Amino acid sequence: MIRLTNLSKTFGAGSRAVKALADVDLHVPQGQIHGVIGLSGAGKSTLIRCVNLLERPTSGTVEVDGQTLTSLSGPALNQARHRIGMIFQHFNLLTSRTVFANIALPLELMGVKRDEITKRVTPLLELVGLADKAQQYPAQLSGGQKQRVAIARALASRPQVLLCDEATSALDPHTTASILELLKDINQKLGLTILLITHEMEVVKSICHRVSLISGGRLVEEADVGDFFTAPRTQLGRDFLNEFLELEPPRELIDRLEQTPGPNSHPVVRLAFSGDAVSTPLISRLARECGVDVSILQAKVESIQERTLGLMIAELMGDAEDTRRALAYLQSHDLTVEVLGHVQRDV
Ligand SMILES: Nc1ncnc2c1ncn2[C@@H]1O[C@H](COP(=O)(O)OP(=O)(O)OP(=O)(O)O)[C@@H](O)[C@H]1O
């Protein structure tokens, strides 16, 4: 449904040039919710604005529903844009218009007749849960209600694609959850394809099917959400995950961690279990079969979409040969093992 090919965007020229996007390839099939996550300045906004050509890419192509937008201009581009809705962090509602009139605006611009506008806006008000607020003004609404109006407005032209630019960043956690639930509902009911950008793992975890990680204008990792939360492949992915899960070793242990093993040191490992491994008593087997003691420093179980993910930070205590065998044992099972470092044994 959305296909970006070799997309690049450079702002400015010469010594002041900023390469905001570099060689981005992305495919979002029909009906998927795809998240793009990255740190501030990574290129997220530029990427999403290139999809409906609010920002013209410097090179590369943008296809939506089989149509190459980058080869269109003028009225043909405007026409194509009707099939792409967009919502923003700060809602971008017109304060002088009522809720109804805000939602009706794109239809008025398309020249839709009054009766038809009423027929289309009324069910949208129902869909976003604001049927009783039709005649109110944005100033009378909460942030969550404003974003609901913006969602209804974005859906008015019956788009196939919805672009969400940090749509929940200005909202509190409870309101965020209700807006994400609404987006999920719309995705399922209308089969709408959603591309969203965010810096919050919670958003990715709650509603995305697939996720891309952006850094320095490049997509550096892409995965199904369950896989990304189980075993991110890049250091940036691991940083996002660890920060989200708040799964770091205790500070005093971090200070003692060494990169290379010493004669009297123990490995400290971060383990991520998914699938069958969650319900297997691996740690007690590890202790029994490899003759090591396992000191659990932190552990938690998360539910990511339909998958259960177990996470643990543990110190493997034993002599060098036993701890080596223990690591090999863990690595041979269905779990992700990351050696965080080695800590000197207390003697
Ligand atoms: N209009 C512009 N002119 C010049 N440079 C720009 C422009 N827009 C963005 N940039 C630069 O492009 C890079 C990517 O910016 P972008 O806004 O896409 O990042 P972002 O990931 O959305 O960041 P944030 O999360 O802070 O909004 C940054 O270095 C930014 O300074």
Image (cartoon, rainbow, N blue to C red):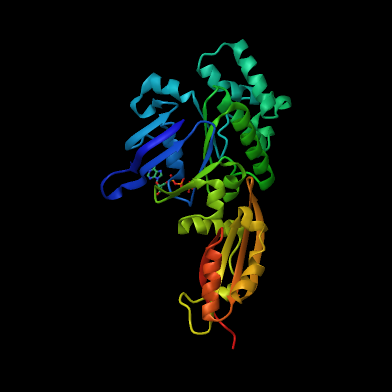
In the rendered image, the vertical position of residue 82 relative to residue 179, given as above or below: above
Q: Nearer the viewer, residue 294 or 15?
A: 294
Q: Residue at x 31, y 43 (%)?
A: 12
Q: Nearer the viewer, residue 310 or 104?
A: 310
State the residue lying farthest toward the right: 132
State the residue lying farthest toward the left: 14
Q: Is residue 329 left or right of residue 213?
A: right
Q: Residue at x 42, y 34 (%)?
A: 3
Residue 256 visible? The answer is no
**Position in image of residue 109 (x %, y %):** 51, 18
State the residue lying farthest toward the bottom: 347
In the rendered image, the vertical position of residue 277 relative to residue 5, given as above or below: below
**Position in image of residue 263 (x %, y %):** 49, 84
Q: Nearer the viewer, residue 123 or 33?
A: 33
Q: Is residue 234 left or right of residue 279?
A: left
Report the quarter where the C terminus lies.
bottom right
**Position in image of residue 303 (x %, y %):** 65, 51
Q: Quadrant of residue 177?
A: top right
In the rendered image, the vertical position of residue 166 relative to residue 252, given as above or below: above
State the residue lying farthest toward the front: 289
In the rendered image, the vertical position of residue 195 relative to residue 313, given as above or below: above
**Position in image of residue 245 (x %, y %):** 61, 58
Q: Nearer the viewer, residue 298 or 24?
A: 298
Residue 296 visible? The answer is yes
